Image (cartoon, rainbow, N blue to C red):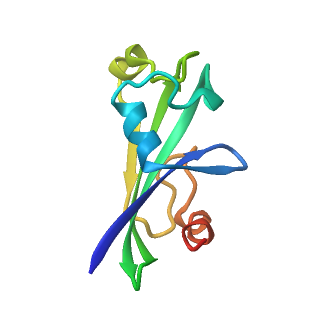
């Protein structure tokens, strides 16, 4: 069994996929990684799933975190160090936090 993951920015009514490259650049401190969300606090969801025939099959887990994006598109490190806003759940449709989508919202996106 293979495991895969995809990263999303979750807003109230929308989910935006971000590339693994952008995610890595963001967490390595690169300026300009997420300028689209500058001066905002966003929710990041990392969806971990099993893969069958090169396609997502079953969501195993969703890790969620709130981060603040600075004007230059990088992570606000002070916000990160003030306290981690991490939540996690088993991926069986329950909410991991009031601001994170249930698993069923990610299934159509993963299958595209």
Residue nearest the observer in this picture, 62 or 108 = 108
Most extreme residue toward the left is 1
**Which residue in the rendered view is the most extreme toward the right?**
13
Quadrant assignment, res 52: bottom left
The residue under the point 40% across, 45% down is 87
Q: Name which residue lies at 37% across and 39% down.
A: 24
In the picture, the quarter occupied by the N terminus is: bottom left
Residue at x 49%, y 49% (from the top left corner):
19
Of 82 and 54, nearer the camera is 54
Quarter the C terminus occupies: bottom right
User: What residue is at 45 percent from the left and 23 percent from the top?
Assistant: 75
Q: Is residue 41 above or below residue 111?
A: above
* Image position, residue 63 (x, y; %): 40, 50
Q: Where residue 71 appears, x then y in whole percent?
A: 58, 15
* x then y, percent, for residue 32: 52, 25
Give the answer, above or below, for where 28 lies relative to 88: above
Name the outermost residue toward the bottom: 53
- In the picture provided, is 37 more to the left or to the right than 59? right
Report the number of discs: 0
Residue 78: image location, x then y, percent: 39, 13
- 52 lies left or right of 94: left
């Amino acid at each position: 069994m293979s495991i895969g993951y995809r990263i999303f920015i979750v807003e109230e009514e929308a989910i935006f996929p971000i590339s693994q490259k952008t995610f890595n650049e963001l967490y390595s401190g690169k300026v300009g990684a997420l300028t689209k969300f500058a001066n905002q606090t966003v929710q990041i969801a990392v969806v971990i799933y099993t893969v069958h025939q090169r396609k997502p099959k079953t969501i195993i887990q969703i890790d969620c975190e709130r981060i603040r994006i600075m004007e230059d598109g990088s992570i606000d490190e002070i916000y990160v160090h003030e306290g981690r806003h991490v939540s996690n759940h088993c991926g069986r449709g329950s909410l991991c936090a009031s601001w994170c989508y249930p698993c069923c919202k990610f299934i159509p996106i993963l299958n595209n």
